[in-house]
Amino acid sequence: MSEEQDEKFDDDWWDQLAIDPITDTHLQALELKAQVPVSTRSESTGLKDQYEPLEAKLHELQALHAKQQELIDTLTRQTQQQQGEIAVVRANWKRAQEQNAGLQQKQSQLELEYHERFERIQQENQRQIEKLETSAAFRRIEQDTNRTPWPSSLRRRAPVMLAEPSTTKATLATALPTTPTRSRMIHYGPSPSSSHKSVSPLSSSSRKRPNPSEQASPSRTRAAKMPTLSTKKEFPRFVNSFLPTPRTNVTTPTLPSVSKSPPTTPSQATQSSSPATPQVQRDATVSSLSLASPDAATLVLTTLFCYRSRWATQVMAQPFVAPPPPNCIPGTNYFPLGAGNHQWSSTFDSVEAQNTIQTANGLESPMLLRLLSLELPEKIPFVIRQRFTTACKKLWEFVTRSSSYNIFLAESGHIVDDALREEDQSSSLAIDIVVARVWKIQARSLFGTVAAALRSLTGIFLRLNWIHYVTAMLNWITALGISHTGFVKFYTEGMQYLDHKDTESWQPLRNDMVPSSQDDAELLPSSPGSAKQLDTSSAPLLTPNNLVKIWIECLSKTHIVPLDVSSPSSQPEKHAQDLPAWDIGGVCRASLLCAVLASMKVLAWTAGVESLPELRPLVQHPGMLLTLLDAHSCSSDLLLGSIELLMLLIPDPTTLHMALSSPYDAKLQPRVAVRLQQVRFPVVDILAKYLVDRRGDTPVATMHHTHQAILLFISCAARHEDTLVVFSESMPLLPALIQCLSWDTEEIWVGSIASQQAESALERVCLTTRLLHQLYAPESNAGRGLAEKLLSPQTQTVLNGIRHAFIVAMGRIAFAQEPTWLSRRAGHDQEQSQSRMRSQLENAAMLAGDLIDLVLSPSETDEIYELLTDSSV
């Protein structure tokens, strides 16, 4: 009702206030105009809100742009700097290339000059050799066509003929000198007052003439006493000087006189018709000769030449006995065959050598002839082939020069004269002293030259990996060392060996000498001046000359490992990362090990204690000594030889201690357990292991010899106090000894074995008991805790029940009755052996009683005694 009333409300004043349509339109237009600025202001406000973050972002981008521009500038400067450095390096490299080209050209020129000089020297030497041969031919013609005297210092003399010391000899001269050589050697005149004097080839202008009061030279005395004859016999060329003829008018020389004797006249010479060949008196003694007598110098020269000829003969007579070649041979820079292992080919050995070497009566060809006729393959570098040729020529030159009496006389005649003049005449051993002195002077060049050549050849074959030739060379060196003990001194003596220059013989290493071996390069001083003198073409291909280093490399190459592991110095060729393992073969390996061991034993045995320090580098090198004791490649003979080598080291405690502590090489011996690689004395553990292991894998006789050798070595080495501590503190040695002792005592008192085996077992029991007493109950000190060692967990781990085994074994030795097999022995032949074994058993029983007292109490000992004496055990 109210709404209806409102709608019906009518008021004039209100009607007047009503807005007409036109006014309403204007009002709406004004409202619209008023609304536009408000929206504009709102839009401008929104744009301002969006502008502020955009402006901040713009400032951030500008800062980032500035940083990037700075980084670009920095990188640009660095690039320009690097480009400059590259340009400098390129310029230096280009300059170095130019210098290298100049050096190569200079090196080529030097090599060409060197070869030309070498050829000239060779031609000059050849001319000198031809001259010597011509002179020797003249002398032989004169001897064969004329009956001339036999003065020892003037003419060639047979090396096996000695001068007759108690008589004077006179021979006939049939003709005047017909050659310049004869006229220079001796003058035949009608009387001693001739103006021509006899000249000895040993005299020279450089030698000092003795005073008239001094003793005359024996060679000049012999030349003065030379008989002459002016008559001529019929048929002078048809005389047999070796037929026995009656000797007349033999007189004894007056020895006390030291003045020069006058020459013999022709009339005196005709009184003797003895042959020209000197006679040998077997009953003549050296002491009856005077040093002033010509016969004294004759005897000394003849003796020395016999020694010299014997040495040269033994060098020539060594037969070529080599094992089969290795199964394969790796390619190296010394023998470039390509990467990997290659089968051995017969073409590696010279076909000419195989055709020219002939054997007679089933004998092997000489080693020297084999080397002289051997031609190395063309693949081997020239420097190695030249080194091989130089060594062979040096050997052949030594043999030829040592066989010539003329050369020997020219080299040693004045030395003998000086030695005879300086020696005391009153000494009964004067001649022997002179011989020893002169031989010592000559032996240095004789032995040194041969040692240099042989060691150089061995090093060459070793780097070529021709193992069978290395074995033959080591056997050759060993044989010469056995026949001549003085040669062993040069096994390891440092010297300069056979470089590419023409040297007369070996010399001490000098600072200006170009080395021809790896050892020479190591001995040279490391100064900048000396480095410039090395020949860059031969420096990379060095060969060892030191025999100890040769032994080390030989032992390394016996392992089945890649060549770059066993011998990196051999420079194996490899195109890949890994090389295959190299196996030289079982026969070749065993032969090489035996050859190395034999040469080592000769050095240790012959040279004595002074040479033992030379073996220290070998025993200190990891794995070398243990290679000889390796169970996988160690035969019984090799094991016995290795133990003998250890026994030879006993006189030098330091070297022996180094040998006992010789470590393993993990690369060469990868099969060795980690525990064995960490032990302090691996050799002692190996020997203790062989005491037990050899009982089951070797025959009884071989086992007995091995057991004896090990026990003897330990007993002898334990004489040194330090080594005694090493053996007594060894963890595996005590269980091994007790285990072997338990087995042997059981065989003697319980088992039924043959009589010979029982005797061997009894010897082992006695040796083991004495060794245990020496180790753990020494006379000088108190017991070394034997009871505690038998109860220690470490010992129990090695041998369970070791204390019980020790008590049973020692109780049987000390208290048990005599074995039944020993009491049953009868017969006259066996009485002495039975008595000896009983005395050994009694001594062992006394020592066993002392050992039992260290372990058991008196009451326990009495119980063991009653138990063993009442029973038959």
Image (cartoon, rainbow, N blue to C red):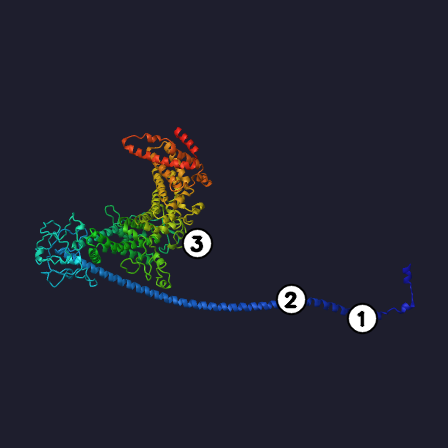
Which residue is outermost to the top? 870
Q: Which residue is mark 1?
A: 30
Q: Which residue is mark 2?
A: 57
Q: Is residue 405 above or below residue 34?
A: above
Is the C-beta separation of discs 3 and 1 under 8 Å? no
Residue type highlighted by circle 1: Leu
State the image coordinates of residue 388 (x, y, percent, origin top left): 30, 56
Quadrant of the image containing the C terminus: top left
The reply, left or right, for residue 804 in relation to residue 317 is right
Residue type highlighted by circle 2: Lys
Q: Which residue is mark 3?
A: 577
Crowding near the residue tagged with mark 2, few <14, some 14–19, many ≥20 C-alpha atoms within 10 Å: few
| Inter-mark Cα distance, 2 to 1 | 42 Å
Q: Is residue 267 above or below residue 858?
A: below
Q: Secondary structure at mark 1?
A: helix
Q: In this orientation, which residue lies closer to the viewer: 401 or 332?
A: 401
Question: Hey, which quadrant is residue 399 in on the image?
Answer: bottom left
- Residue 851 in view here: yes
The reply, left or right, for residue 867 in relation to residue 195 is right
Identify the mark nearer the N-term, 3 or 1: 1
Crowding near the residue tagged with mark 3, few <14, some 14–19, many ≥20 C-alpha atoms within 10 Å: few
Q: Secondary structure at mark 2?
A: helix
Quadrant of the image containing the N terminus: bottom right
